[in-house]
Image (cartoon, rainbow, N blue to C red):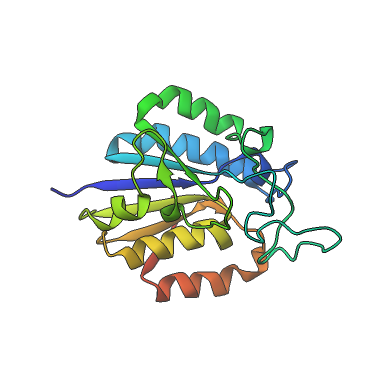
Amino acid sequence: MSSRLLVIVDVQNDFCEGGALGVGGGAGVAARIAEHVRRTGDQYDRILASKDRHRGDTDNGGHFATPPTEPDFEETWPVHCVAGSAGAAFHPEMETLAADLGDRLEVVHKGYGVPSYSALEGQVVATGESVQALIADREWEQIDVVGLAYDFCVRATALGAADAGGAASVRVLRSLTAAVHPDGIGRLEQELAAGGVSIEDV
């Protein structure tokens, strides 16, 4: 039986405007994702929503820049999405969506103590399922990837889903993303296409 999966990546306060690592347009992405899910959610067999969930007592394997060293915004970052902090919570648009969907929206945690970009590195909180196995072990007709940020965690999730081989089609829905480095989107989309990921607007 064919099936469809939606992966919503890291739509958290720290990745939206005003957050520790805010992406320009992040709040708008949150609102558009919520609208998309309300309009099309019945078309998906499962909806996953990942959260960065880092430790506050370590640099998480070099993921957080350690003062006096400044973050390079490529491999090292400001402190963000520490477990239990307001910054680690979903953006309010996502919080409302999660409340509306109940068990239909399955939360995934990733990055506790280690650098983590792809949602495939996480586990479904309610079931303990590995997202990597969830994708690789089932013949998905289509996997859609949305969220923040386009050039880091969305990129890694989409390429990981395509590489896992569990889907006939992996798509990034471009209008439901925003990038840390917008000037690099052209190169990013060439990389995604080369990796078997299609890019579409909705």
Task: Residue at 35% x, 30% y: name it.
Answer: 104
Q: Quadrant of residue 18?
A: top right
Task: Residue at 48% x, 57% y: name it.
Answer: 118
Foreground of the two, 34 or 159: 159
Horizontally, residue 48 falls left or right of residue 19, namely: left
Is residue 38 visible from the viewing direction of this image? Answer: yes
Residue 198, percent across and down? 39, 65
Q: Quadrant of residue 180?
A: bottom right
Residue 76, percent across and down? 70, 62
Horizontally, residue 97 falls left or right of residue 80, namely: left
Foreground of the two, 200 or 16: 16
Task: Tell me: residue 12, above or below residue 156.
Answer: above
Q: Quadrant of residue 105?
A: top left
State the count of labels.
Answer: 0
Residue 152, percent across and down? 57, 61
Foreground of the two, 72 or 36: 72
Residue 109, percent across and down? 49, 43
Task: Residue at 30% x, 34% y: name it.
Answer: 42
Is residue 199 visible from the viewing direction of this image? Answer: no
Task: Tell me: residue 100, above or below residue 20.
Answer: above
